[in-house]
Amino acid sequence: IQTNKRAAMEITDAGFDFDLFYSGLSDAIIPIKAITPVVKDVIKKLSYLYGINAIDMKNVLMNSISQDDQIDIEQLRKSARDWYQFQYGDELPGLVDKIQPLHSRTEMQKKERTQEEELIYQLETISPRQFLTDIAGGATPSAGDLQIIEEVMIAQKLEAGVVNVLIYYVMLKTNMKLTKGYVQKIASHCTRKQITTVKAAMDLAKQEHRQYQQWSEEKTTKKT
């Protein structure tokens, strides 16, 4: 298991140079009023996920303006993905390679652990990509599964360890398959409950087991 220390997943204004971004905007091309709080938040997330700086972000944004001079959020996300693929090829960005930040871990190094403490420790010190690989017996995770996890991490701003709990629970309940809608529903629930640690995510899964099971059955019924 990899235990390399990564930075916490914090997406703040400090991570993106909005001064430089705004200084280059022209009302004739990108109206300032189009940069709403929602758009600004998406810009920060996309910059964090794809490594897009303030200069390149203006070009990405130009491809996302609708006919009424508004920013089309879905088109903005697509433009950011297109930019990334043009720069780096089809390889996904590295959000799924992050691990739980140290300040959000509960199980540090100790000689003896209970079975649950050992599971928490494992989920805190492994990346979602590696966890998916281990679950599959060493097989490379599918691009579809990785994309589902990437989208959840960036949309809900969940820590890597919390996502690992989500993967663990969903795989147990859905015959080892990641169902996008089911994953997104549980992820948004974790966000609403402000879950940031592996232990809290596991406790929530136990408390909300009946609700999660109902969501799972709803997905199955719809498919049928």
Image: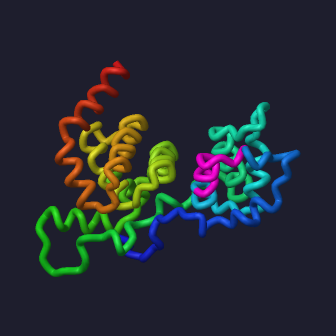
Q: Position of residue 198 (x, y in %)?
A: 28, 61
Q: How many marks?
A: 0
Q: Main secondary structure of the magenta part?
A: helix
Q: Position of residue 56 (x, y in %)?
A: 76, 59
Q: Nearer the viewer, residue 144 or 116?
A: 116
Tell me, yes or no, whether the highlighted magenta stretch contains residue 112: no
Q: Nearer the viewer, residue 152 or 207?
A: 207
Q: Name the residue located 72 percent from the left edge and 44 percent from the top edge.
A: 34
Residue most toward the top? 224
Q: Name the residue located 47 percent from the left edge and 65 percent from the top edge.
A: 9
- Position of 100 with respect to 60 (left or right) is left
Q: Quadrant of the N terminus?
A: bottom left
Q: Position of residue 211 (x, y in %)?
A: 23, 35
Identify whether 10 is placed above or below 81: below
Q: Quadrant of residue 208?
A: top left
Q: Which residues are magenta?
A: 34-44
- Residue 38: in sight, yes or no? yes
